[in-house]
Image: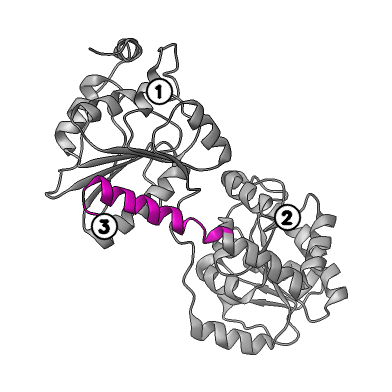
């Protein structure tokens, strides 16, 4: 007999309009279905999918509202089926999964109970406080608990989640933390790095990455202040639009008297160069050369324009403003770990640069940021082992 809460939930969902799903063909072999409730969880699931493909050879389906940027080419992606019995039944008939893994706090009762009726092993990872999908809230007695009860294991992402899940009587509950994300290590030409490092001859360097026009004055003033402390200081300045480089070079050199070199014009920084203008085509190279990186767009722009983990993964210490843009959760984690220097004004930026010109301070910040960029490996390994156990392979 269907529980009352689930019956009410199904009735509520039937009132919405639906359309037939169009899915790619199911390949032959064992299929693991991974579901991510949003973009943040999708990154972790994409990395887990890579491990499953490379190490076990299983077919992997990742359902998420949008295709994540880190998903491997050999992993299937599709939007999740609508939360209605006929939709999830059609999805199950098409994909015929061997195991189903959810991430985050969103529970999908229609999908979970259909999978349970087919005796599929299920688990919830990177779990947060349980809730129904957005727009499907309502009074459904016992629904969250009965849905959670179908899981073989629930891996909580933090202490707050652990407390909420314990209250909801989640089975197999343990605290594992965040899972691994796709690597943010960008490529860089080692021969070019060695050649430029020789040209720069151990000069102190800082990088201002993807800087909008609204932040250029603050960057230049911070550099001017930094030169008073380290007279050989070199600024690698990357405008957000490379088309602005020639005009920016002319303004800095002719109107303000700076010694400027332009990478797109095949110019190299010599001993007199104070500002080296570059574009983003070699961003991995600039991160490797610069022990300090300011994240453009975060101070006076519309939000941070580059993923902070790119610089962190390559050992550069971070300075950012109060506007995280799309990287709010990342900035929050960096801040909680004291792994980045936050500034609120151009004066703060100059002070932060002066502070990080101390190699010890920059190294301490960079090490903390690198730890954030590389965490989650242990949790991903544990989830991978769980899947093998669910499949009877471990």
Residue 282, image x, y percentages: 52, 71
| Image quadrant in which the N terminus is located | top left
Q: Residue at x 55, y 55 (%)?
A: 307
Residue 104 horizontal side relative to residue 49, left or right:
right
Residue 83, image x, y percentages: 31, 23
Q: Earlier in the sequence, mark 2 or mark 1?
A: 1
Q: CA distance from mark 2 to mark 1?
A: 51 Å
The answer to whether the residue labelled 3 contacts the one labelled 1, judged by CB atoms less than 8 Å apart, is no
**Secondary structure at numbered mark 3:** helix
Magenta stretch: give its range.
Answer: 372-394
Q: Earlier in the sequence, mark 3 or mark 1?
A: 3
Residue 338, image x, y percentages: 70, 56
- Residue 75: mark: none
Q: Nearer the viewer, residue 144 or 192?
A: 144
Q: Residue at x 18, y 30 (%)?
A: 118
Residue 231 in view:
yes
- Disc 3: which residue: 53
Q: Nearer the viewer, residue 60 or 377?
A: 377
Q: Is residue 384 magenta?
A: yes
Q: CA distance from mark 3 to mark 1?
A: 32 Å
Q: Residue at x 72, y 46 (%)?
A: 322
- Figure disc tally: 3
**Secondary structure at numbered mark 2:** helix
Mark closer to the observer (2, 1): 1
- Disc 1: which residue: 145
Q: CA distance from mark 2 to mark 3?
A: 44 Å
- Residue neighbourhood size for the residue with mark 1, other residues' Cα within 10 Å, grouped as few (<14), some (14–19), many (≥20): some
Residue 194, image x, y percentages: 56, 86
Give the main secondary structure of the magenta stretch.
Answer: helix
Task: Determine the image quadrant of residue 103.
Answer: top left
- Disc 2: which residue: 215
- Residue neighbourhood size for the residue with mark 2, other residues' Cα within 10 Å, grouped as few (<14), some (14–19), many (≥20): some
């Amino acid at each position: 007999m269907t529980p009352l809460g689930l019956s009410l939930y199904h009735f509520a969902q039937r009132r919405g309009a639906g359309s037939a799903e169009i899915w790619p063909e199911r390949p032959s072999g064992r299929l693991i279905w991974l579901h991510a409730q949003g973009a943040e969880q999708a990154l972790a699931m994409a990395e887990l999918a890579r491990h499953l493909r490379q190490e076990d050879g299983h077919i992997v389906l990742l359902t998420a509202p949008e295709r994540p940027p880190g998903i491997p080419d050999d992993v299937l992606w599709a939007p999740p089926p609508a939360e209605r019995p006929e939709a999830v039944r059609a999805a199950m008939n098409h994909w015929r999964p061997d195991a189903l893994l959810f991430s985050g706090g969103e529970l999908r009762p229609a999908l979970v109970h259909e999978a349970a009726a087919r005796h599929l092993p299920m688990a919830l990872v990177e779990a947060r406080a349980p809730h129904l999908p957005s727009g499907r809230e309502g009074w459904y007695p016992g629904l969250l608990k009965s849905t959670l009860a179908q899981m073989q294991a629930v891996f909580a992402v933090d202490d707050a989640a652990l407390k909420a899940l314990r209250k909801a009587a989640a089975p197999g509950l343990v605290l594992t933390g965040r899972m691994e994300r796709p690597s943010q290590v960008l490529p860089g030409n080692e021969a070019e790095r060695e050649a430029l490092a020789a040209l720069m001859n151990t000069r102190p360097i800082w990088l201002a990455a993807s800087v909008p026009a609204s932040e250029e004055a603050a960057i230049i003033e911070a550099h001017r202040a930094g030169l008073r402390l380290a007279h050989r200081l070199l600024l690698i300045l990357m405008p957000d639009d490379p088309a602005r480089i020639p005009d920016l070079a002319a303004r800095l050199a002719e109107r303000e008297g700076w010694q400027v070199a332009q990478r797109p014009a095949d110019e190299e920084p010599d001993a007199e160069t104070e500002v080296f203008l570059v574009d983003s085509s070699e961003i991995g190279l600039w991160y490797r050369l610069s022990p300090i990186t300011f994240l453009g767009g975060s101070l006076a722009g519309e939000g941070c324009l580059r993923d902070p983990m790119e610089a962190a993964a390559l050992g550069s210490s971070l300075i950012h403003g109060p506007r995280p843009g799309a990287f709010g959760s990342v900035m929050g984690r960096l801040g909680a770990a004291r792994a980045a220097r936050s500034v609120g004004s151009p004066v703060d930026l100059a002070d932060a640069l002066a502070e990080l010109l101390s190699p010890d301070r920059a190294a301490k910040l960079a090490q903390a940021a690198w730890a954030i960029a590389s965490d989650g490996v242990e949790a991903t390994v544990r989830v991978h082992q769980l899947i093998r156990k669910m499949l009877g392979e471990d």
